Image (spheres, rainbow, N blue to C red):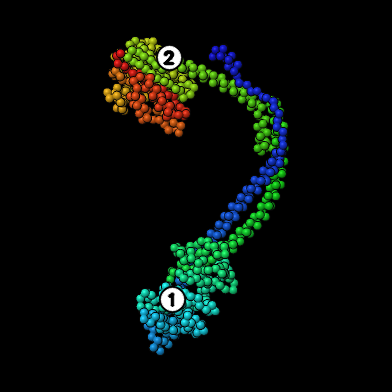
């Protein structure tokens, strides 16, 4: 670097200027802010936690009640099914072959009935289309002889009407004997004759299962009627005064064998209902429980949580007062030291009182003044390095030829864009006698090291130009030796070199592992396609700089008027869009065919290619240097 440039760098050296300014006055002490913060955060957090916990507990409790209700109704339905099966399996053999005129047979049936103490009465009705229902059998056990409903004509008529609609149903009997009327129709109601069996069944041990406990109220439901099975001295009627038929309509319409849901009574009382099918006559067992009874445990949880909440809040306030006092003492020292820093005194130090974060802050503050001085030195060093890189870039720009060149029938156009301050790509052309030298290279990586290799390549090329008469394969061997001696094999370079006779179009070339250029043949139709692109893949050898004694081969082709050569580096293939998608070779070749076939002038063709590159890239950064140039063999003017 010249003395003039050194003086200019020193003159432009960044400096750190500290302006004195008045430190803001404290209006609200940090101690009170911390105290308020340490108190509000637990308060809000605990309040949210309490709300979420209560909501979760309530949902869990309701889910448990739903599950328990389904389990209970399923168990009761299975017991009911068992009792009904027992009744039908016992009663039907008794009434079979009954003849009321045979006194001996009647006595035998009576004894058979008394053998089953659960059965209080069996009444068999026969239906004929011309005479209606007629009683054909009546057997009554001693314990049921006093039940008035057995011989009540209106009661029997009600059973006859129900039997037309249901194949099996149950009607409540005498509460004193805990009995039920089980009615089974034998035969279709649409045919004649058919029979209706009425049985009085004592189920005290079974009904006790419906009435035990005080949480649930249980009901037996069929398509018409609803029977409360839990009314008793110790059971409150949850649905007292409610129209049971309309209330349990969702249960009757339920399509699932068992389910649970919430129902609201006509008096706006929320209840949790579970049901299960019995499996006979469309019967269903339903259990009902009041929602407020289920959530009573939630109220207890709220009270206990509030007590805990207040105790924890008090403890938090005490801890916050102590912590804020200890914390703000050290921060006060830091505040006073900051005022000195603002005045430009960097020799101030703060005494460290603890080994926690505040103590670490004090240690960091003590190192701040020394760090500022170090940063000033680093800034000057960085400015010097940037200046030197700019100088390297300026020097490297002199290595490249004019973007446009013209030698008789050969016309050249190209461009280069580095990915950083300095690039690792290099291209060149020159006239050696009657031949035009064309070359392109790509050093490993980019930046200052790669730029030094391009300088070595340019120096070797200058020697080749001076010697004259050097063939392409010999030129590569000379350049390989120069680059190997420069980088000692640590940095390599791909390279392509060609000599074209400026008038005849005879071309001799050699390649050192560089991406093969494309020979674009002139299309007679005027429109180019991929078949017009011929890669020059012959005479390929090792990269420059790998070994000092590498040898290379060369080959020869003939250019026709209108043919065009496209030279490029792999950086153009690796261009990415703002989303990181790679451009790729396919898109590059498509751009070549469309751009080279849409214009007559070489400069315009290159401009179209650059336009496609810039349009795809957008504002994305280059990941590698981009170099592309074209040489066209024109017709004789």
Circle 2 sits on which residue?
459
Q: Is residue 257 above or below residue 140?
A: above
Decide which of 501, 369 is in the foreground and name it. 501
> Percent x, y for residue 462?
41, 13
Residue closest to the eye, 537 or 412: 412
- Quarter holding the C terminus is top left
- Choose between 399 and 240: the one closer to the eye: 240
* Relative image position of residue 331 (x, y in whole percent): 70, 36
**Disc 1 marks which residue?**
161
Q: Nearer the viewer, residue 344 or 149?
A: 149
**x and y, in percent, of residue 134 in the image:** 40, 82
When the figure is inspected, residue 460 is found, relative to residue 210, above or below; the finding is: above
The numbered mark, 2 or 1, whose residue comes first in the sequence reads 1
At label 2, counting other C-alpha atoms closer than 10 Å, the crowd grade (few under 14, some 14-19, many 20 or more) is some
**Residue under the point 28% across and 18% down:** 560
| Occupied quadrant, residue 17 | top right
């Amino acid at each position: 670097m010249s003395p003039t440039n050194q003086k200019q760098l020193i003159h432009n050296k960044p400096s750190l200027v500290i302006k004195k300014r008045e430190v803001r006055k404290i209006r609200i002490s940090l101690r009170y802010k911390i105290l308020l913060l340490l108190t509000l955060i637990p308060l809000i957090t605990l309040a949210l936690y309490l709300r979420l916990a209560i909501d979760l507990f309530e949902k869990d409790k309701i889910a448990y009640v739903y599950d328990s209700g389904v389990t209970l109704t399923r168990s009761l339905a299975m017991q009911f099914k068992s009792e009904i099966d027992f009744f039908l399996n016992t009663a039907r053999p008794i009434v079979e072959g009954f003849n009321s005129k045979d006194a001996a047979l009647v006595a035998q049936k009576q004894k058979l009935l008394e053998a089953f103490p659960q059965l209080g009465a069996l009444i068999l009705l026969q239906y004929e289309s011309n005479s209606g229902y007629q009683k054909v059998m009546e057997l009554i056990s001693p314990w049921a002889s006093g039940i008035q409903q057995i011989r009540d004509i209106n009661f029997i008529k009600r059973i006859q009407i129900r039997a037309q609609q249901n194949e099996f149903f149950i009607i409540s009997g005498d509460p004193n004997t805990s009995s039920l009327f089980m009615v089974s129709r034998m035969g279709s109601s649409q045919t004649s004759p058919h029979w209706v069996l009425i049985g009085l069944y004592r189920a005290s041990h079974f009904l006790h299962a419906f009435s035990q406990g005080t949480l649930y109220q249980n009901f037996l439901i069929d398509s018409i009627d609803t029977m409360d099975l839990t009314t008793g001295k110790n059971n409150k009627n949850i649905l007292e005064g409610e129209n049971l038929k309309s209330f349990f309509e969702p249960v009757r319409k339920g399509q699932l064998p068992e389910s649970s849901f919430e129902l609201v009574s006509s008096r706006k009382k929320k209840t949790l209902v579970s049901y299960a099918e019995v499996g006979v006559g469309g019967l269903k067992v339903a259990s009902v429980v009041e929602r407020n009874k289920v959530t009573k445990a939630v109220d207890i949880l709220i009270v206990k949580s509030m007590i805990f909440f207040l105790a924890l809040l008090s403890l938090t306030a005490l801890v916050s007062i102590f912590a804020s006092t200890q914390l703000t003492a050290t921060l006060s020292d830091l505040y006073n030291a900051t005022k000195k820093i603002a005045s430009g005194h960097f020799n101030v130090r703060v005494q460290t009182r603890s080994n926690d974060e505040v103590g670490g802050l004090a240690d960091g503050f003590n190192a701040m003044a020394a760090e500022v001085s170090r940063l000033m030195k680093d800034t000057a060093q960085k400015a010097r390095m940037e200046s030197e890189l700019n100088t390297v870039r300026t020097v490297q720009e002199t290595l490249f030829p004019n973007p446009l060149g013209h030698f008789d029938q050969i016309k050249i156009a190209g461009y280069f864009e580095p990915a950083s301050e300095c690039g690792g790509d290099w291209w060149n052309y020159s006239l050696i006698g009657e031949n035009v030298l064309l070359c392109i290279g790509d050093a490993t990586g980019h930046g200052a090291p790669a730029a030094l290799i391009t300088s070595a390549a340019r120096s070797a090329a200058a020697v080749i130009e001076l010697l004259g008469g050097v063939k392409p394969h010999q030129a590569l061997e000379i350049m390989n030796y120069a680059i190997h001696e420069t980088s000692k094999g640590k940095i390599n370079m791909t390279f392509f070199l060609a000599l074209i006779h400026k008038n005849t179009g005879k071309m001799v070339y050699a390649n050192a592992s560089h991406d093969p250029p494309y020979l674009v043949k002139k299309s007679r139709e005027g429109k180019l396609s991929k078949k017009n692109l011929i890669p020059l893949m012959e005479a390929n050898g090792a990269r420059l700089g790998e070994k000092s004694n590498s040898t290379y081969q060369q080959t020869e082709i003939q250019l026709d008027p209108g043919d065009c050569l496209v030279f490029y580096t792999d950086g153009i293939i690796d261009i990415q869009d703002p989303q990181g998608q790679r451009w790729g070779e396919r898109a590059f070749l498509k751009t070549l065919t469309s751009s080279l076939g849409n214009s007559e002038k070489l400069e315009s063709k290159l401009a179209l290619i650059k336009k496609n590159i810039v349009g795809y890239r957008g504002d994305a950064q280059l990941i590698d240097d981009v170099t592309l140039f074209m040489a066209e063999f024109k017709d004789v003017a």
